[in-house]
Amino acid sequence: MGRHGRRIWWLAGMAAVGLALWGAWQLGALNWLWEENHPIRPVVEALSWVAGIAGLILGILALVVSLRQLRSDHGAQGGTAPRPSDATGKYAIEVRDGRGVQIGDHNAQTNHFDR
C-alpha cells in the first residue's frame, strides 16, 4: 500500500472518529463533562494530567534518541564534510589515493592523476 492508500485510510479513520464524537454530542452522551459533581469527572481530569506528563516525557526521550543517532551517524562518517554533488550540480569529482572518481549520471570514471 502506497502513501496515497495510507493517507486515505487515515483520513477515513479521522472522519469516523469525528462522526462518532458528533453523534455522541448530539445524543447528549458527553453532558457529564460539564457536571462538576459527576463521579467520573475527577478520573478523567487525573488521566489528562497523566497523559500530558507522559507525552512530555516521551517527547524528551524522542529528542534524546534522535540526537544520539545524529551523533553516531556523524561519528561513523569520520567527521568528513558531505559530498558537494548536491551543491555543485550534476557531477562531482572525488579524489581518493591520487585517483579521481567522477560520480553522476550513473557514470563512474576513474582517472589516474599521478601518471
Image (cartoon, rainbow, N blue to C red):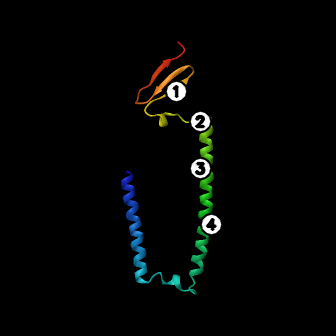
Q: Give the residue drawn at x 36%, y 59%.
A: 8
Between the residue at mark 4 and the residue at mark 2, the CA separation in whole angstroms equals 37 Å
Q: Secondary structure at mark 4?
A: helix
Q: Mark 4 to mark 1: distance in Å?
A: 50 Å
Q: Which mark is residue 66?
A: 3
Could you say which disc has been placed on residue 53 in the image?
A: 4
Q: Amino acid at mark 3?
A: Ser
- Find numbered disc 1 in the image and state the secondary structure of the residue it sits on: strand
- The vertical placement of 103 against 49, above or below, is above
Label 1–label 2 contact, CB within 8 A:
no
Q: Does label 4 or label 1 sit earlier along the sequence? A: 4
Crowdedness of circle 4 by 10 Å Cα count: few (<14), some, many (20+)?
few
Q: Callout 4, which amino acid?
A: Ile
What residue does disc 2 label?
77
Q: Amino acid at mark 2?
A: Gln
Q: Sequence order check: which comes first, mark 3 or mark 4?
A: 4
Of the residues under marks 4 and 2, which one precedes in the sequence?
4
Q: Position of residue 48 (x, y in %)?
A: 58, 72
Residue placed farthest to the front in the image? Answer: 88
Which mark is nearer the camera, 1 or 2?
A: 1
Label 1 sits on residue: 94
Q: Residue at x 52, y 84 (%)?
A: 34
